[in-house]
Amino acid sequence: MKLPIDNHLTRIAYRLGIVRLEDWVLELMRRSMHFSRELDTELRLAVRDAWDAVIRIGKLDPIAIDDFLWRLGRTICIRDKPQCDKCPLRNACNAYARGGLFINEHNHYLTYYY
């Protein structure tokens, strides 16, 4: 089963560092630029592949992981003001290790096709 990749799973993947973004992509994100359909798709596929690897290597239940990550993204690893001190993944998080330097998910609003 492939996880459905929403903004929460994307944001968490970027912050944890399981998906590394090129500098030009990070710059677009910092400037809150709208991403093209093609770039959005490419990034979501990379995030999906990263979570699939985590599930496979960790021998984890994909449904349980999806539920955990979605809830984490809605309550703790939130956009703009994450509550890192409450996060059970903070010791594995690149953003937390860098002193709270975090990024949000990329901007793509025309999502009628998925």
Image (cartoon, rainbow, N blue to C red):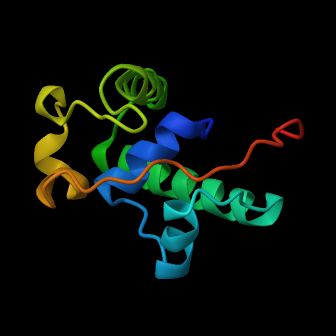
Residue 81 appears left or right of 67:
left
In the image, 58 versus 82, the foreground residue is: 82
- Residue 101 drawn above or below residue 7: below
x, y percentage for residue 47? 53, 54
x, y percentage for residue 90? 15, 42
x, y percentage for residue 91? 10, 46
Residue 7 appears left or right of 51:
right
Residue 33 occupies which quadrant of the picture? bottom right
x, y percentage for residue 23? 47, 80
What residue is rendered at 63% in x and 53% in y?
44
Given the current orientation, which residue lies at the most extreme bottom position? 23
Count of picture labels? 0
Residue 46 appears left or right of 42:
left
What residue is rendered at 64% in x and 50% in y?
107
Res 66 seen here: yes
- Residue 17 drawn above or below residue 84: below
Residue 67 occupies which quadrant of the picture? top left
In the image, 95 versus 42, the foreground residue is: 95
For the C terminus, give its image quadrant: top right
Given the current orientation, which residue lies at the most extreme front position? 31
Residue 64 occupies which quadrant of the picture? top left
In the image, 49 versus 112, the foreground residue is: 112
What residue is rendered at 19% in x and 51% in y?
100
What residue is rendered at 49% in x and 35% in y?
8
- Residue 24 drawn above or below residue 51: below
For the N terminus, give its image quadrant: top right
